[in-house]
């Protein structure tokens, strides 16, 4: 990675950093408050989702917990590299929309999955299932936020004009996170498909429908040559 590109990344991260941190605090607070409350206080009978043929084909491996938890490193990539006010606003609206839509489903139709025997698993998986109950299965928020974040990261990385392998790395990482939801048996396939569709749809609605791609092609922030030395 050349020095100019590193400098450009630093400038992008520093731009509106206070606003980014406030957005992160607001969004994380909203997501976790609704998610964990509804996990522990279902208002309607819980529907247990059984595994389908593809779920039976995928073996349980608790080692995939590390990829499952890596979503918390994956999600911040896109917002940290955003520099446009409109882009940050649409990002906030999109994450809030995913949270509200999923929470409405969790509230009205609570679902759960059956977890495997945890007597011989590692510490990371034991901690995961201690914190995260089997409820709030459909749709998978992990899949929704992973797909949405990958699409958002693709946008900002394209704007940054970094190496092409970054795009490949983003989608490989995203694929590993989505697969981990199945390999750890946190979700079944129908949860993942629904979550991924939600993430893709909301990204499309919040960014493409308003013509954001065309407007962002004329950047508001110019990197001066001196900044990239």
Image (tube, rainbow, N blue to C red):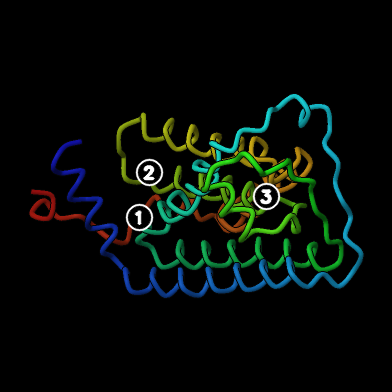
Q: Is disc 2 in contact with disc 3, using a CB cutoff of under 8 Å?
A: no
Q: Which residue is the site of mark 2?
A: 157
Q: Is residue 89 left or right of residue 160?
A: right
- Picture quarter containing residue 11? bottom left
Compared with residue 45, is residue 2 higher up or lower down, i.e. above or below? above
**Considering only vertical position in the picture, is 176 above or below 197?**
above
For the residues marked 2 and 3, what is the alpha-carbon distance in whole angstroms? 20 Å
User: Sequence-wise, which precedes: disc 3 or disc 1?
Assistant: 1
Image point 74% across, 52% down: which residue? 139
Residue 192 at x, y percent in the picture:
71, 42
Please state which of residues 107 and 114 is positioned toward the viewer in this rendering: 114
In this orientation, which residue lies closer to the viewer: 76 or 120?
A: 120
Which residue of the protein is positioned furthest toward the front in this rendering?
119
Label 1: which secondary element = helix
Q: Which residue is mark 1?
A: 81
Numbered label tally: 3
The numbered mark, 1 or 2, whose residue comes first in the sequence reads: 1
């Amino acid at each position: 990675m050349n020095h100019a590109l590193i400098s450009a990344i630093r400038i992008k991260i520093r731009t509106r950093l206070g606003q980014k941190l406030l957005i992160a605090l607001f969004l994380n607070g909203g997501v976790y408050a609704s998610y964990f409350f509804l996990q522990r206080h279902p208002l309607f009978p819980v529907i247990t989702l059984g595994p389908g043929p593809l779920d039976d084909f995928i073996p349980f491996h608790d080692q995939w917990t590390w990829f499952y938890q890596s979503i918390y490193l994956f999600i911040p990539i896109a917002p940290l590299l955003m520099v446009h006010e409109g882009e940050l606003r649409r990002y906030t609206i999109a994450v809030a929309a995913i949270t509200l839509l999923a929470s409405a489903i969790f509230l009205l139709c609570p679902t759960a999955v059956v977890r495997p025997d945890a007597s011989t698993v590692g510490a990371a998986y034991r901690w995961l299932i201690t914190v995260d109950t089997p409820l709030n299965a459909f749709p998978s928020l992990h899949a929704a936020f992973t797909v949405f974040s990958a699409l958002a990261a693709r946008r900002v990385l394209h704007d940054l004009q970094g190496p092409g392998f970054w795009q490949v790395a983003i989608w490989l990482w995203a694929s590993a996170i989505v697969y981990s939801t199945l390999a750890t048996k946190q979700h079944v396939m129908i949860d993942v498909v629904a979550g991924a569709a939600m993430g893709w749809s909301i990204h499309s609605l919040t960014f493409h429908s308003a013509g954001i791609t065309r407007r962002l092609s004329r950047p508001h922030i110019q990197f001066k040559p001196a900044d990239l030395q």
